[in-house]
Image (cartoon, coloured by chain):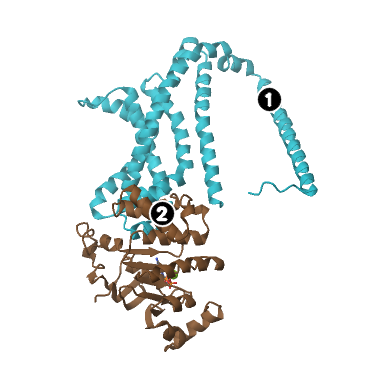
Chain colours: A cyan, B brown
Amino acid sequence: MIKDVPLSPLAAERAAFRRSRARRSTAVAFVSTLVFAVALWWAVTSAPGWPRVQATFFDPARAWESLPAVLEGLWLNIRVLVVAELGVLVVGLVVAVLRTLRGPVFFPVRALATAYVDLFRGIPVLIALYLIGYGVPALRLQGVPNDVVVLGTCALILTYSAYVAEVFRAGIESVHPSQRAAARSLGLSHGQALRLVILPQAVRNVLPPLLNDFVALQKDVGLISVLGAVDAIRAAQIEQARSFNFTPYVVAALLFVLLSVPTGRIADAVAARGNRRRSGR
Amino acid sequence: MTPVLQVEGLVKQYGGRPVLRGIDLAVAEHEVVALIGASGSGKSTLLRCIDLLEEIDDGRILLDGVDVSDPRAATRRRRNRPGGAVAAQKSMAIVFQAFNLFPHMTALENVALAPRVVHGLAAGAADERALELLSRVGLADLADAHPDRLSGGQQQRVAIARALAVQPRLLLLDEITSALDPELVGEVLAIVRDVARSGATILMATHEMGFAKQVADRVCFLDGGVLLEEGPPEQVLGEPREERTRQFLARIIAAGRLG
Ligand SMILES: Nc1ncnc2c1ncn2[C@@H]1O[C@H](COP(=O)(O)OP(=O)(O)O)[C@@H](O)[C@H]1O
Ligand SMILES: [Mg+2]
């Protein structure tokens, strides 16, 4: 980087022009956003049913009242989310690796992993939650927990790991075969090549879709409410039943959105960094 | 004395199409053999078969007199024993045309990987050896750079250091300068010359005829999967016996590569 070359008058004049253009673009964007927002606001509030909707869904007093309960519920969602994300990473990676194993010894393992992915990618999350949340306790097995939060988390891990395993597998297959050849030629075993050469590149290649799946998981943790766990959605439902006002649901929705925005931004940043890397230095 | 490498009647097919049609070749200890031939004649395939990266369809590959191409050498039980496939792989190293460095590792980590995880050196000792080799190829100051920060010539020099790090009995070089800009070819060839002089056993596919003439003890001409002609460089490159060899060299001269 050459720093101390003085700008020629030509370059200085051009830079000034670019700056003034940039200022103009910002101003235009600001005004157009304002106009658009006002028009949208007007369109919604001038609807004939708006006063009713406002009273039922956007009542500030109800929102404030329900906030503590919904927040407490959200704390459960966050804890479930962290455990589920870690579980999904581990199970997904293991299943992906099992599916890439070669050799006849591994046939049953491979077949089992494939069957698992087919099954849990196909089952709607809600049904998986019911089957595991109500089915497992009904077995009355010794030592198996029947806490709905634990079972709900397991159901989420099993469902999402099936997706994430496929993401990881795509990542493993995206690493060029010459990388494996280079590793084997140095004498690395299959396991070493996978662990030290293939997987680090595979995971990096699939970070954006992986984070996208995590955003989806972030809102699906709310589904454990169907098992009766008092999470943000369930708390909102309890509040709603007390007052016959739907504002608590909107509060819960806003909190879920706030929760997912950072992950979405991280996913964007990671994808942008990946693009920069690929497009040269 | 037993040659380091003996290839006997090697046949390799891709989808029923023979690419190597019965190759016989021996490389003695400290010998440098150049493999020349048109694009598509099977040079890369031969080197990949020798490095056990491809399964062969017929013939044998012997390393220090031991048949390493026997499928029994690749079984779980035998592959790590002397004469086993993994053991054989540990005693060879290949440098690819496209470098194939590990992009998520620094130059140093690329070179230190095999000494550490394959040959069981402690991390410190492996790094030390790697740094020594990087100095040897003139890249000590770029040890911490990732491959995407290095020029093609620098990447290929790291790849050579990585291959040398396993102290191979046999070094295989597959057109290692073909992917490089012309002004970067010299820096890579200089290192190969140095390695050859230090007594390494080398089998190299190359299009650099001038370099082959200087460094190789023997030149083999591969044509359509057959070893058509072999001999001292002056003979094969200067007074080729075969018409096909003459035609090939004439094309190379026309392309300005016989320096
Ligand atoms: N993996 C492969 N599958 C099918 N055909 C291949 C494969 N690798 C090489 N070939 C074919 O084998 C022939 C020899 O290729 P190669 O050994 O790369 O030649 P060279 O290195 O001399 O240019 C070519 O016709 C090529 O198309
Ligand atoms: Mg080739």
Name the residue at 40% across, 56% down.
B132
The residue to which callout 2 is attached is B131
> Cβ(mark 2) to ligand 2 < 8 Å?
no
Chain for disc number 2: B
Q: Quadrant of residue B26?
A: bottom left
Rendered position, A43 above or below B99: above
Name the residue at 52% across, 34% down.
A264
How far across and down, in percent of the image, does residue A37 sit? 68, 27
- Left or right of residue A143, residue A189 in this image: right
Q: Secondary structure at mark 1?
A: helix
**Quarter of the rendered image showing ligand 1:** bottom left
The residue to which callout 1 is attached is A43
Label 1 crowd (10 A; few <14 / some 14-19 / many >=20): few
Q: Nearer the viewer, mark 1 or mark 2?
A: 2
Quarter of the picture containing the N terminus of chain B is bottom left
Task: Name the amino acid, label 1.
Answer: Ala
Instruction: Give the camera-side residue of B144 and A29.
Output: B144
Rendered position, A110 above or below A122: below
- Left or right of residue A2, residue B34 in this image: left
Compute the Cα span from label 1 to label 2. 69 Å
